[in-house]
């Protein structure tokens, strides 16, 4: 159980870093707005992506293993995709309300997109999150699991503890900096 928890924590941190890289890529390369730290902490991670990744893994991990077909056509990946879109959209909407409540604002505005709700969520980003979630569930998690099998139990302990210390120090530093 401890090893699985450590794997989930490492996955959480990996998704957080991937989310930060995705956000920075969009900001710098796609929209050409220039660089800014897209996370709420100092480090290169967006915690909401880590939370979203864990929610997807825990809620849809078993579903993706099912073998549902319509005739000879496998439909499980389609069901998983729509599940990802629904869950990530709900996480993003909840995240916007939590950020507004705690910080007075949220960090994105989707009003320029069609099919948006209060600029908090929109169809275009939801579909992108669906695609990203498929990559996370079908590629990143299996690769991480395979890589973690190569780690000794002690190696996993050390890696997860080091990441936990880094995150804890960052949280404390962020809180102190903003006081």
Image (tube, rainbow, N blue to C red):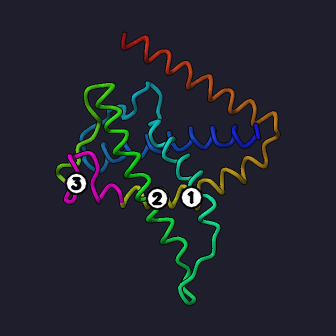
For marks 3 and 2, give the CA distance. Answer: 18 Å
The 10 Å Cα crowd at callout 2, few under 14, some 14 to 19, many 20 or more, is many
The 10 Å Cα crowd at callout 3, few under 14, some 14 to 19, many 20 or more, is some
Residue underneath mark 1: 60
Q: Earlier in the sequence, mark 3 or mark 2?
A: 2
Q: Is residue 48 left or right of residue 3?
A: left
Name the residue rendered at 33%, 32% in the picture.
99
Q: Is label 3 in contact with label 2 (beta carbons under 8 Å)?
A: no
| Residue 122 on image: x %, y % | 27, 54
Name the foreground residue: 148 vs 25.
Answer: 148
Q: Is residue 125 left or right of residue 170?
A: left
For residue 6, what is the image quadrant? top right
Q: Is residue 104 above or below residue 18?
A: above
Name the residue rendered at 53%, 48% in the picture.
55
The kind of secondary structure element at disc 1 is helix
The kind of secondary structure element at disc 3 is strand
Q: Is label 2 in contact with label 1 (beta carbons under 8 Å)?
A: yes
Q: Quadrant of the C terminus?
A: top left
**Segment colored magenta:** 113-126
Q: Is residue 122 left or right of residue 179?
A: left
């Amino acid at each position: 159980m401890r090893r699985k928890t450590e794997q989930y924590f490492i996955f959480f941190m990996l998704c957080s870093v991937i989310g930060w890289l995705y956000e920075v890529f969009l900001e710098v390369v796609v929209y050409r707005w220039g660089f800014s730290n897209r996370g709420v902490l100092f480090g290169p991670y967006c915690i909401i992506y880590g939370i979203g990744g864990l929610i997807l893994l825990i809620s849809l991990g078993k579903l993706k293993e099912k073998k549902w077909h319509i005739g000879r056509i496998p439909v499980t990946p389609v069901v998983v995709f729509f599940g990802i879109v629904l869950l990530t959209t709900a996480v993003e909407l909840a995240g916007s309300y939590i950020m507004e409540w705690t910080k007075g604002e949220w960090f994105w505005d989707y009003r320029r997109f069609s099919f948006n709700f209060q600029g908090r969520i929109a169809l275009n980003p939801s579909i992108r999150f669906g695609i990203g979630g498929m990559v996370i569930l079908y590629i990143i998690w299996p690769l991480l699991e395979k890589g973690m099998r190569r780690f000794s139990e002690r190696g996993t302990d050390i890696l997860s503890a080091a990441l936990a210390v880094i995150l804890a120090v960052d949280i404390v530093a962020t809180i102190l900096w903003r006081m």
